[in-house]
Image: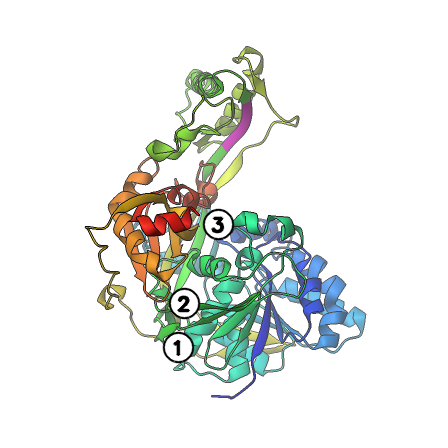
Amino acid sequence: MSSARTIRIGGASGYWGDSAMAVPQLLGAGDLDYLVFDYLAEITMSILARARAKNPEAGFATDFISFVMTPHLAAIARQGVKVISNAGGVNPDACARAVRGLIEAAGLDLKVAVVHGDDLMGRAQALADMGPEEMFSGDPLPDRERLASVNAYLGAFPIAEALARGADVVITGRGVDSATTLGACIHGFGWGRDDLDQLAGASLAGHILECGPQATGGNFTDWAEVADSLDSVGYPIAEVEPDGSFVVTKPPGSGGAVTVGTVGEQMLYEIGDPQAYILPDVVCDFSAVTLEQQGEGEVRVAGAKGRPAPDSYKVSATYADGWRAGLVWFFYGEDAAAKARSFADAGLKRARRTLQAFGAPDYSETSVELIGDESVYGDFARATATPTRSVAVKIAAKHFDQRAAGLLLKEVTGLGLSAPPGLSGFAGGRPKPSPVVRLFSFTVAKAEVPVELHVEGEVVELPPEPGTSFDPAALPRPTPPPEPDAAADMVPVPLIKLAWARSGDKGDKANIGVLPRRLDYAPYIWAALTESEVEQRFAHYLQGRVERFFMPGTGAINFVLDQVLGGGGVASLRNDPQGKGYSQILLQTPIPVPRSIAETVHA
């Protein structure tokens, strides 16, 4: 291993559509070695695939060209910062051509490399013949004509190889989000495949960076502490050490905050089993990770552990599954919630009656949600002293026929003049039906996925990546916190007084990570937040089971809720199809604590 200095990596994009302010801010901070960009999500891949079908030169994240490389290429070259991005989407060669055109026009001498191998759409039939099953439902792969995209999640070693061959800009298609950061560290420190703890540590650094300002005050439980500076929120920087530990910081003078809470929430975001965070290059164990506030705007992260890489890649396919349509109206005044429900019921009845008249089948699924009405959050909502006087009503449905989906929009809109009083809405045209795109996840042996590098005309075939089988069920589990003293004088306080929390999605699963504000709060939170308690709190949504995992390094708990998002993503009709607000529901849970703690947190 190398004894290289600390590597400074700026996380400049968390999704396709992120703010353009990240790159000038991070370049202004200076002394960066790498800028890394994450643009891709599963649904983004299907959108890019449709774009490429219409235009052979489309299918990549155009923001990378228009908002990053065009205005900032000269500064990037002048500072010697290397760029790693998954902006290639389903057409990384077209993305690379656009970048090379900018380099040539600017008269610069920069080398561009492209990682190939993730796009398996051309092999969809061969994959189907192998009989893959969806990893959660066990369903068979849909017919080829319904597929929109099929992509393997590649890892970081191809990126490191591209950097070793002198690349200044590395463009990939689909890979795990953290691979851009890990690839930089593998190259910079000379790590090998057996440096497992180091690989796990840098993967965690990538996980912190991949959502941009979600690590620096965005989506934060204590949002009011940073609200006045979110207009200039700082994008995160990871200062990675040769042992894989790292410090999270942000550009001087930028808004937001870097605290144990902001970084810890992001660590817990969208993970499953924290001892089995499976990546192509390493199986990460984050359960013993520690977070230390080193000073204002600096948090040190250490203690990640790694196990050998798995022997397969995760593959995500997206496929068409009919159409969905929906719209939102508002009601205010007396009995607003009752009026909204009546309006929604009438709209659905009209649409169904028309379907029957045409001999068409009923909607496969409908959804009515009243946003602003506490009952939308189930039986555990906080009681309100007066009836709700202002609500938004969302009405949506699915159907295999686009015309039938559009019919709902027509009939609900046509109900406007015969609605209960108090109906209102922001002026605009009637929405249109949109395709339902579902996710199908499965695994493929690494040997079945050849990977290549294209470096300025040179094609480099990389050998199959090694791996071993992995069974998380065989892992030894950490000892949970001790039971609280049953004889203590206990007082209930809301969880939000004791912990930070963040939630997210993986397909039709949601996770809720709960991070105690102090380690000595962990036993009380663990005792109160049982799997049964969480099941009851989400009973209005939950169709599967709840799993609970303890992380002794921070005292955190991660909950994984199965079949809780109505299909997830654009396959769902829910107002929150990605579970982003689920933590806010859980944070209202009363937690019995000793009176001495209750008096402290209420002070």
Identify which amino acid the numbered label 1 is placed on: Asp
In the image, residue 94 above or below residue 41: below
Q: Earlier in the sequence, mark 3 or mark 2?
A: 3
Q: CA distance from mark 3 to mark 2?
A: 28 Å
Local SS, label 3: loop
Residue 197's disc is: 1
In the image, residue 248 above or below residue 422: below
* Residue 331: quarter of image: top right
- Give 230 or 344, whichever is nearer the viewer: 230
Q: CA distance from mark 2 to mark 1?
A: 13 Å
Magenta stretch bounds: 325-330
Circle 3 residue: 221
Q: Earlier in the sequence, mark 1 or mark 3?
A: 1
Residue 142 at x, y percent in the picture = 38, 48
* Residue 332: quarter of image: top right
Q: Earlier in the sequence, mark 2 or mark 1?
A: 1
- Give 222 or 277, whichever is nearer the viewer: 222
Number of numbered tags placed on the structure image: 3
Circle 1 or circle 3, nearest the eye: 3
Identify which amino acid the numbered label 2 is placed on: Leu
**Going by the picture, which residue comes out furthest to the top?**
418
Residue 295 at x, y percent in the picture = 55, 69
Magenta-span inclusion, residue 394: no
Local SS, label 2: loop
Circle 2 or circle 1, nearest the eye: 1
Circle 2 residue: 279
Q: CA distance from mark 1 to mark 3?
A: 30 Å
Q: Can residue 175 be seen in this snapshot?
A: no
